[in-house]
Structure formats: structure tokens, C-alpha cells
Image (spheres, helix red, strand yellow):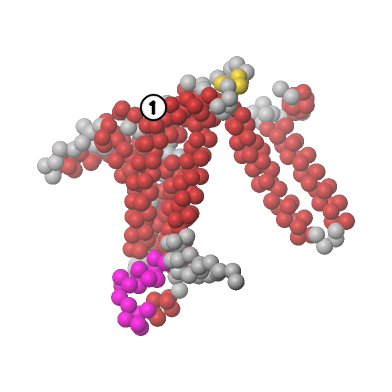
Amino acid sequence: MNPTIGWIRQLAESWGVPGVLVPLVPFLVLLAVLYAVIGLAAYGAKRKWPRADKTIAFWLFISPWLIGFLVFTVGPMLSSVYVSLTSWDLITPPKYVGIANYTEAFQDPRVAQAIKVTLLYALISVPLQTALAFLVALLMNVDLPGIRLFRTIWYLPSLVSGVAQIVLFLWVFNPQYGLANDLLGKAGIEGPGWFNDASWALPTVILMSLWTVGGAMVIYLAGLKDVPSNLYEAAALDGAGVVRLFWHITLPQLSPIILFNVLTGIIGALQIFTQGFIANGGPKDSLLFFVYYLYDNAFQNFRMGYASALAWILFVIIMALTAVTLRGSAFAVYYETELGGRRRPRLRKG
């Protein structure tokens, strides 16, 4: 332990600070020192540049987030780059191994399986969630008595934690006494094994993901409320029907929101963890999601170096898919400042 931190903790204990709060004292002291430095710098800048009040206020207000971002996000990310180049079991000192962890990852068949399962989940679940959330938003975009209750009912499942969701659906999709197979049995259909069947485990998790489309539905609903009504009125006067109104007004106006939901959906799907963790990877690694395999290496096998390498591989995959999605959006997303559905033509020189 750093001698200064140890001295601060001893001082806190001598002042009668409760034992639970003692570890927080050095951190609070560090924050106080940082704010003091920022305050002194702001005071000096204000004296030297009297008109810099707004700039000073901006940096003062953003400094708590900036400090937290540097300490708790940038710092761990940079340290994980180094850890990914080492062999470290959390007990012995890290041993530098170069790119051996990355080489092993590209040769590990379970990494290939984890990437396959995760990409399949993302490529199937995200379009289904997007379509269902958009459809529900269209249905909820009416002024009828009690419509707010239905909107709330659709939104509430998105507030349920992932663990609670899978516990609920483990009962719903239980092969022996689950609700799903009970209903199928009454219809004369023999239900599948769901989570216990390697061929049905991933489709079951995809079905689960559709239960929480309420969050995206609210965003789409807000976008629908923001579409100018005069656009619909003008198009209706020109003889446009419901389909043309949807295709030429509603869809283009909501295309930036669709892009946002698709991007956040892809990023979230690639980081799915809870379902694979509760199912312990599923039968025959059918639910071996990438983040679960990363966790298994880090906190079950204590291979922090290898897990850090996997984390950076996932980072590259997410960035690549995000870049491809954004690149493709240039041909499909409409902004009022641009030509709808097309990229702006480049002007030739001369």
C-alpha cells in the first residue's frame, strides 16, 4: 500500500471514522485535492482573463465526470492493454509474454464458438427487436382512453434485471412443468427441450430478448410524436395512402432514431452475459457468449492476461460492426439538412 494512503487511513481511524468508510477516505481526500487544484487554476485564470467566466464554469462543472472518466475508464483500459500482454493469475506478479495471448485466442476453438454464438444472437435478435419495438410504437401512437396504461405495461419489462428475467423464463420454458410446453401440450404439440436442448437454447434466449423491447418502443414513440403533422396533411392532400405515408414520411423521419436503436442494440447484444452465465454456457456450448467466456477465463481460471486479450478482441469486433453500420447508414438515414436517403453528391473541382 502507498505510504500516503496508509497514513490517511490511520488518521481516519484515529478520528473515529467507521471501519466500513475508512477505505473511502483516501479517495475523498484525492478528490478534494483535485478540486482544490482546479479551483486555484480557475481563480488564477479568472484574474488573468476576466472574460473567461463561461470557460471556467464549463471546466468546473465537467470536472467531476472528467476525473471519474480518466480514473475509472481510461486508466483501467490502458492498464488492460498491458495486462493483455502478460500472464497473470492475480497472485503472482505479471509475466510479459508479448502477443502470446492473442495468438492463443485466434487458435482457441472455444473463442471461435463464442464469436459464432454471439454474432448469431446479435444478427437475429437486433432486427427482431427493432421491428417489434417499431410496430408496438406505431400501435401505441394513438389517443385512446387507457393508452398510457398499455404503454406502461409494454415498458415495464425493460426495467427487470437480467437475472430476474432468466429465472422467470427458466420456469416458462421448463420442459417438464413450464408454461410454454403446457400450452403447446394442450394444442397437441410436443414442446422442445428449450434451454436443455442445444439446438433450441439460442432461439430461446432470442425469444427472451423480445420481452424487453419497451425501452426502444419509448424512443420510437417519442420520435413519432415529433414528426410534423403538416407533412402528413400535405401528403394526404396529394392523395397519399397509409402505405405511402409510412414509407415516404414516417420511415425517413424516424431513420436517425432507428439507426440509434440498431447501434445500441448491436453493442448490447455483443456484450450479452447474464443468460450464458446462468445457463453455464448451455448444452454443448450453445450459449457460450463471448463475454461469458471472457468472464470464465478471468474469474474462474484466473487467466487475467488472456481475458484482457479477449476483451480487446471484443472491442475491435464492436468497433468494426459499428463502423460498418454507420457507413451503411449514409445511404439509408435521412436528415433534414441532407438529401433524403442519398449521400450528398460531391462537387467537381473546376
Q: Which of 286 and 57 is in front in this view?
A: 286
User: In percent of the image, x 44 and y 61: which residue is there?
Assistant: 331
Considering only vertical position in the picture, is 221 above or below 86? Answer: below
Quadrant for the C terminus in the image: bottom right
Magenta span covers which residues?
A: 235-252
Where is residue 167 shown, x and y percent of the image?
35, 36
Q: Report the residue marked by disc 1.
A: 109
Residue 211 among magenta residues: no
**Would you say residue 169 is visible in this rendering?**
no
User: In percent of the image, x 35 and y 72: which residue is there?
Assistant: 245
Left or right: residue 333 versus residue 208 is right
Q: Is mark 1 on a helix, strand or loop?
A: helix
Left or right: residue 258 versus residue 42 is left
Where is residue 302 shown, x and y percent of the image?
51, 21
**Would you say residue 31 is visible in this rendering?**
yes
Q: Nearer the viewer, residue 240 or 137?
A: 240
Residue at the front extreme?
Answer: 350
Tag 1: amino acid: Pro
Q: Which of 275 and 323 is in front in this view?
A: 323
Considering only vertical position in the picture, is 81 above or below 303? Answer: below
